[in-house]
Image (cartoon, helix red, strand yellow):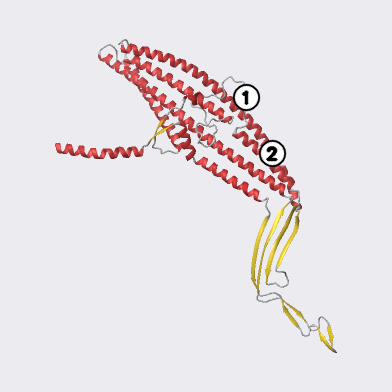
């Protein structure tokens, strides 16, 4: 029997380390700061990679448009084998007669057949065409592609903003959730302590069983509330892991943000200055869309002009005797499609209507941004008021907890009284923490709306934007 017990212990000692290693591999523990979480999210996000590729695509499109300034160069060549060659027949005396020494010599003296060319014919050449009258239209096209590139860059920055703020909100949401769970655990412990005290009182005959049902229900309520908070915490964790691209089985340990980051306030409440919104990404894109419509109208006006250009080239051929072997040429070309002149009127009307739409969109975007800024500043002021009140509650709860702690050490109160004070303190701390987090989120939204987002890590790519409402405490 002792041998079997020792054998089982030996086997367990060998297997247990491997099980622990397997568990640690399947569930990595990652300690994250806010900056690190943002950095990982920006590196792993698929949407941001797509936006970056779109920027690269627009850069190539700008290069393509600029190439149209250059002359159009054409290279060509051919080879031909002729089974039958062309010929020139000159009959006898075609060019008259030549008297010579009393003799009359016909020119030519006999019928002549002259073959022109050869069986093998080669030719090659290069031609150049430089547009002249359409340079204005080409320039407008280049400006349009450059504007599209600027829009793509702003979209990239906006996507990066959305990712950064999304990580920030999930990060703060998890920190708030952890505080709430801490409070809920203390409340559950308090409810269980009161229930245990009631059971002791019933056994001692100092209370009836009817009061225990209410305490049992209260304990069950606290347990249910704790479970809800744990589920919410799991959902927030899954969201953060998905946004950062980490392993779904990773267990996160979040570091609290620095005090300076939470207290920073580039737009103090009560300031009468109106924030500058010209750096807002949506507003910039709306203005660029209007500018692109202006360029499109300008390009349509150049379409009325005929296509005038200069041309030149060089050709070489061998095998056809009636043409020179080397030939260089230069000239001009004029083309004018009158049907395009007629249809261009409708094109101009369409582009004018597009320009009016872009103007309306710019005005609407500006109004929306102003409304969003007003809402963000209002949330900042509200959060600051909540912080002041929550800080007062924390001070009072801290003093109350010290009194209950001293009483408990002196045996003047029960364990339940101390737990109640600790739970109330945890609640006050959670409320203060949530108020400070929501203040930071509202401030971040304002910074993003005004294009003044404060980078916390210099090595991170530029880009941010606003997303969902702030986490509610």
Image spot of residue 241 (x, y percent): 43, 36
**Residue sitting farthest toward the front:** 101
Per the image, the residue denoted by label 2 is: 355
Instruction: Please indicate, yes or no, whether residue 350 appears anywhere in the rendered image.
Output: no
Q: In the drawing, does residue 414 fall left or right of residue 374?
A: left
Image spot of residue 48 (x, y percent): 52, 40
**Tag 1 near tag 2, CB within 8 Å:** no
Circle 1 or circle 2, nearest the eye: 1
Instruction: Please indicate, yes or no, whether residue 236 appears anywhere in the rendered image.
Output: yes
Image spot of residue 359 (x, y percent): 68, 35
Q: Residue at x 41, y 38 (%)?
A: 248
Q: CA distance from mark 1 to mark 2?
A: 29 Å
Label 1: few (<14), some (14–19) or many (≥20) C-alpha neighbours in 10 Å: few
Figure check: 321 above or below 233: below
Figure check: 383 above or below 6: above
| Relative depth, front residue between 74 and 373 | 74
**Residue sitting farthest toward the left:** 1
| Relative depth, front residue between 159 and 224 | 159
Label at residue 274: 1
Q: Earlier in the sequence, mark 1 or mark 2?
A: 1
């Amino acid at each position: 029997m002792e041998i079997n017990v020792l054998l089982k212990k030996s086997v367990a000692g060998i297997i247990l380390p491997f099980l622990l290693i397997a568990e640690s591999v399947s569930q990595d523990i990652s300690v994250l700061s806010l900056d690190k979480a943002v950095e990982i999210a920006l590196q792993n996000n698929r949407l941001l990679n797509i936006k970056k590729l779109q920027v690269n695509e627009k850069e190539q499109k700008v290069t393509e448009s600029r190439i149209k300034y250059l002359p159009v160069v054409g290279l060509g060549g051919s080879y031909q084998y002729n089974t039958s060659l062309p010929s020139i027949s000159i009959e006898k005396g075609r060019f008259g007669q030549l008297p010579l020494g009393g003799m009359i010599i016909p020119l030519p003296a006999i019928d002549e057949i002259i073959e022109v060319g050869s069986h093998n014919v080669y030719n090659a050449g290069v031609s150049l065409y430089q547009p002249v009258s359409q340079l204005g239209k080409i320039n407008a096209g280049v400006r349009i592609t450059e504007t599209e590139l600027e829009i793509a860059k702003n979209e990239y920055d906006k996507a990066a903003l959305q990712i950064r703020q999304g990580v920030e909100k999930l990060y703060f949401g998890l920190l708030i959730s952890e505080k709430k769970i801490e409070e809920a655990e203390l409340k559950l412990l308090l409810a269980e302590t009161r229930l245990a005290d009631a059971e002791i009182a019933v056994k001692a005959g100092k209370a009836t069983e009817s009061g225990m049902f209410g305490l049992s229900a209260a304990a069950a309520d606290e347990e249910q509330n704790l479970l809800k908070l744990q589920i919410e915490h799991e959902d927030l964790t899954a969201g953060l892991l998905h946004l950062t691209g980490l392993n779904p089985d990773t267990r996160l340990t979040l570091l609290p943000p620095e005090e300076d980051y939470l207290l920073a306030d580039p737009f103090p409440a009560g300031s009468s200055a109106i924030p500058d919104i010209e750096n807002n990404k949506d507003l910039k894109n709306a203005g660029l869309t209007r500018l692109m419509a202006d360029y499109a109208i300008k390009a349509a006006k150049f379409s009325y002009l005929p296509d005038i250009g200069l041309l030149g080239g060089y050709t070489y051929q061998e095998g056809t005797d009636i043409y020179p072997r080397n030939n260089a040429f230069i000239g001009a070309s004029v083309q004018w499609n009158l049907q395009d002149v007629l249809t261009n009127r409708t094109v101009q009307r369409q582009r004018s209507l597009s320009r009016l739409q872009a103007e309306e969109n710019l005005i609407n975007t500006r109004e929306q941004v102003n409304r969003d800024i007003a809402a963000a500043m209002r949330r900042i002021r509200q959060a600051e008021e909540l912080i002041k009140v929550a800080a007062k509650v924390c001070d009072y709860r801290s003093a109350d907890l010290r009194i209950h702690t001293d009483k408990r050490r002196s045996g003047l109160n029960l364990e339940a009284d101390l737990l109640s004070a600790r739970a109330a303190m945890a609640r006050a701390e959670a409320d203060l923490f949530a108020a400070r987090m929501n203040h930071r989120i509202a401030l971040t939204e304002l910074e993003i709306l005004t294009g003044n987002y404060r980078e916390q890590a210099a090595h991170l790519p530029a880009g941010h934007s606003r997303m969902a409402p702030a986490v509610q405490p």
